[in-house]
Image (cartoon, helix red, strand yellow):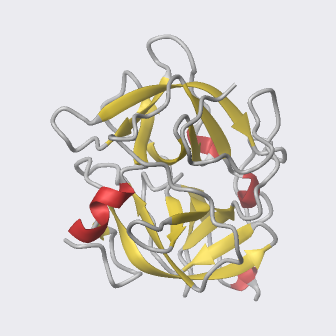
Amino acid sequence: MKMAARIIALVALLASPASADPAAEPGLAPLSAEASLGAVARIRAANRVEGGCTAVLIAPDVALTAAHCARGSVSGPNAMRLTFRPDATPPAFAVTVRAVAFHAEQKNEGLSTETAHADLALLRLAMPVPPEVAQPIPLATGPEPANGAIYGYVNGADDTLRGHFSCQIAPARPQLLISDCRVVSGFSGAPLLSGGPGDWRVEGIAVATVFGQPYRALIADVVPWPAFSGPYAIHEPPSADPQTSP
């Protein structure tokens, strides 16, 4: 599959019911799935009230997001923070990011189809997220399915979870997937999920949008588990069971 013929431009994504039309704007998560998607969080600096990215809880005190979303501080009043159910009044739970481990091949360079697979960051949280707030979504273990779902938070809209419940998935290159679902500003770090309510599995993390047809999103593959670097790296998929990170 020749990606170059489809990609006109590649940009980072900083910056109604869930849609059945992959080309449409992400729609509201269906009520049947909303409760099981509590692990999908908004990430932004603690002193910000707009903008940001999406992250997904994969263990009680570990989350995944896009690397370009995780360049902020991990200390002080501007430290990065994950907010779970930010649409609730007050939000269900907020926790500070205490450390970050980046993909071993992450070089903090511009995104391209050659580098997008490494646009991943592992977030170590200051404390575990209580199970009554969110249940972590474990990593998938098998080959990528032909279809999945993408959910995240849209910048410039209210903090209600939105997404697509039926996205086609295909391999683009090693460790990189493509999807036909439209992703928008705020969806960087959003999880690509297989399974369904009560049995979700994380297949990858949305890192960029593609301008071209028929594919609209680049997904950094996390199956098999990628290599992270630094003292806070985890070298195998973390357990979704209760734990405290070292």
**216 to 39, vertically: above or below:** below
* Spot occupied by residue 93 in the image (x, y as percentages of width and height): 32, 32
On the picture, is 181 further left or further right than 7? left
**207 to 230, vertically: above or below:** below
* Spot occupied by residue 78 in the image (x, y as percentages of width and height): 46, 18
Choose top left, top right, bottom left or bottom right for residue 218: bottom right
Residue located 77% across and 57% down the image: 115
Choose top left, top right, bottom left or bottom right for residue 43: top left
* Spot occupied by residue 203 in the image (x, y as percentages of width and height): 61, 66
Identity of the residue furthest to the front in this view: 242
Identity of the residue furthest to the left in this view: 89
Choose top left, top right, bottom left or bottom right for residue 132: top left
* Spot occupied by residue 29 in the image (x, y as percentages of width and height): 28, 66
Residue located 65% across and 29% down the image: 245
On the picture, is 58 further left or further right than 115? left
Quadrant (top left, top right, bottom left, bottom right) of the N terminus: bottom right
